[in-house]
Amino acid sequence: MVGVEELASLDFVLWRRTGKQAARALGCNQSTISRRLGRCLEVFQLKMRRRRNEWDVPFSLLLQLERELHQHCRLLGHLPLRLEACPLTGPLLAHPLPEGWIGGCYDHIGVERPLQLLRNRVIDAWLCDAVDDLPPPAERLDLALHPLWRNPVALHAAPGHPLAGERALTSTDLRSFPCLDIPAGAFERSRSLLHGLGLYHRPTQLLNYTSTGWEERAEDAITLLCFTPLNRLASPGLVPLDAPAPFGNSGALLCHRDLASHPPIQLLLETLRWRLAQKSATLPDLERL
């Protein structure tokens, strides 16, 4: 077994990506994180490895059992519970967090990494805005999904775009302009539907979300972006085009099934639902679930 601080140091480096960010979240210095991290890796006989821009460790049943024990300590209030969330709607709905919770990076592109962190019990809950891109229900029986909203994913552009303000746009109109592509491997179902429109897709190599890498790419008044109503609230600099939405998607709070009824999870869920109700008053195309 390892101490709470030692395992937290490992998990926060995996979650927040750097010792500096882990130290900031845990209220200590980087040398302390390094020492605790080394002790944890030694106990479990593991080595960290880098995959793209994320740190990881090989699967260890002993480590997983230890994480489960420490997670129940967090549920009892001994340390803050951990929430990861989607880039734009996460801060919009989850800030400030209820007492007893701490937030994460809020910059993941795709569902793979947050799902891995959740399943490994590095984090305790995940606010996901792309439920339709998750593995099918039969492949996530270990998780509880609390539906929150459903909305269209529509094409948006800068206010100065030639199509902004035009009515009843057709696919021919849209194909005259490039569309910023969803990164490969991120949201495969959504990416496939977007490609089905036959648009020219301008490639992007984003590893993690940044406004300069996404919204500001439309400032050329040429490039089209995929956006949801909640995205638009969080980043109001873009306007929806009067064209059929290519697809829809849903938002939900996910956690391990054995945690779903615990009071801190329910409190977080109530907070998200209340804030969603406040925001949705001005969003007729958003359906609360």
Image: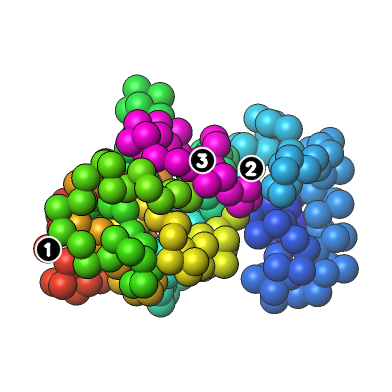
Residue 111 in the magenta stretch? The answer is no
Which residue of the protein is positioned furthest toward the top in this rendering?
138
Do the residues bearing badges 2 and 1 touch, measured as CB atoms within 8 Å? no
**264 relative to 281, above or below:** above
Viewer-closest of 285 and 9: 285
Do the residues bearing badges 3 and 2 touch, measured as CB atoms within 8 Å? no
Q: Secondary structure at mark 3?
A: loop
**Which label is found at residue 284?**
1
Q: Residues within 10 Å of mark 2 (few under 14, many from 20)?
A: some
Q: Secondary structure at mark 2?
A: helix
Q: Secondary structure at mark 1?
A: loop
Q: Residue at x 76, y 75 (%)?
A: 28
Say which amino acid is labelled 2.
Glu
Mark 3 or mark 1, earlier in chain? 3
Residue placed under numbered mark 2 in the picture: 66
Say which amino acid is labelled 1.
Pro
Say which amino acid is labelled 3.
Ala
Q: Residue at x 81, y 54 (%)?
A: 37
* Image: magenta residue range: 183-207
Viewer-closest of 82 and 135: 135
